[in-house]
Amino acid sequence: MSTGTGTGAGTVGPVIVDAESITKTFTTPDGRALPVLDGISFTLREGEIVALLGKSGSGKSTLLRCIAGLIAPSSGTVSYRGAPLNGANPGVAMVFQSFALLPWLTVQQNVELAMQARDVPEEQRAERALRAIDLIGLDGFESAYPKELSGGMRQRVGFARALVVEPDALLMDEPFSALDVLTAANLRGELTRLWEGREFPVKSVLIVTHNIEEAVQLADRILVLSSNPGRIRAELEVRLPRPRDRRDPQFDALVDAVYGILTGREERAHAAVAELAEAEAAVSASAVRAATPADLPLPEVSAGGLSGLLEILAARGGEDGLAELAEDFNFEIDDLLPLVDAAVMLGMARVADARISITDEGRAFAVADIDTGKELFAQAAAQRAPLIRAIVKALRTTTDGSLREGFFLDVLRRGFSADEARHQLGIAIDWGRYAELFEYDAERGELVLPGVPGVPGVTAEAAPVA
């Protein structure tokens, strides 16, 4: 197994992968064009780790698959060592979030499988597989099956399977997100030690992540992607020596810088929602689609979690830095983002320069009793959250105050995948139930306004919609 060339920031060599003006557009079931990537250009060179960082909808995984040659861009070119791709990229290997192991094969057989696809002679497979398994710390588990392994060990098999083919570039798609915090931290540390110790049989790494601290910890360069469609919004160099200390002020400064870039989008999104809340439009199917923009999905947070964030913020004088909040309360810094998204969307907080400040509406919600808090949440959600607003308006146009969930799923699929659409509707149902704006009848698969016969326990009046 050859020795890698990972030497840290500042030491880079020839270009391995060159992406030029990559655009990718998918077609929805109703024939609409859904742009996912728009004009993305960057290079990946020998001796560097590059992180693609962005939220849902930024097209990170789609871009990675274009680089791997698994899907073709709608326009633009991906080149490997100067040659444009016309199929799978011969110089890369991938590590997936979901492990992607074959359960009926042993650890060694799963690792050897990658070499079979590349026509490595059979007599070499066992030797190389065992060397890769030992490198990644699974020596002694060669004959074990995936069901016998923990999540961290299964991901190690995924790493071994990618490394055994000695690719020029290792592509990783959220490789640590399915693991618990301690296991993920351990694997990130081992990855760094292998890279810095020149034991990695790869010349470069490209990692997709939504975790800011992970990107700062691992990468020499961070490409921050905007969403819907994905574009490169900023590029930051990370010149900190490895191993990197999360308590280092320079580490914090980089995290804050990335937060400033990401939360700048929230200010624009908040302005867009405010405009939407002021506009009066006829309630129709087209109005429902317009009120459910894919670039402003509902964050996966509860009203209680939102109230907790606002209570903490109020107790700290109404304003604080996002990184400081995370550190003081022992959060993963990225765990705050959904709560921040929700607070900004509902007009209960503002974000600027990686600092969050509470609004009068947010302060009122934070100190309210249960019933008053529900009313305030209902008013904010019905006016400012596009999907909630659309659902309430659509239900009020019907004669019996009910609509099948399939109607809303069909609308959402114009901007989301099927799984994402179902997830968004689930969040909306939770918000609507808490706010008593609408209920969900699971037996009939219907969303219904309060007071509809046959839906037990729903008697409250819905909050007004602007």
Image (cartoon, rainbow, N blue to C red):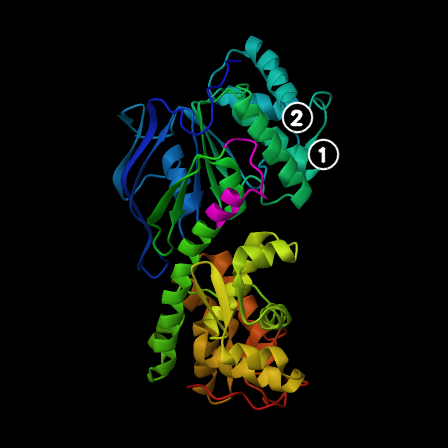
Residue matched to label 2: 107
Residue 154, horizontal then vertical, whole percent: 65, 34
Q: Is residue 393 visible?
A: yes
Q: Is residue 5 left or right of residue 108?
A: left
Residue positioned 54% across, 42% down in the render? 214
The magenta stretch spans which residues? 241-255
Residue 206, horizontal then vertical, whole percent: 44, 34
Residue 68, horizontal then vertical, whole percent: 40, 33
- For label 2, the SS is helix
CA distance separating discs 1 and 2: 9 Å
Q: Badge 1, how many Cα within 10 Å: few under 14, some, many 20+?
A: some
Q: Nearer the viewer, residue 242 or 18?
A: 242
Q: Nearer the viewer, residue 240 or 87?
A: 240
Please determine whether, in this image, residue 36 is positioned above or below residue 359: above
Residue positioned 63% across, 90% down in the render? 459
Residue matched to label 1: 149
> How many numbered discs, if any?
2
- Which image quadrant for residue 433? bottom right
Q: Is residue 303 left or right of residue 403?
A: right
Type of amino acid at the residue the image marks with label 1: Leu
- Which image quadrant for residue 19? top left
Residue positioned 56% across, 30% down in the render? 192
Q: Nearer the viewer, residue 95 or 312?
A: 312
Labelled pair 1, 2 in contact (Cβ < 8 Å): yes
Residue 66, horizontal then vertical, whole percent: 36, 38
User: On residue 465, which mark appears?
Assistant: none
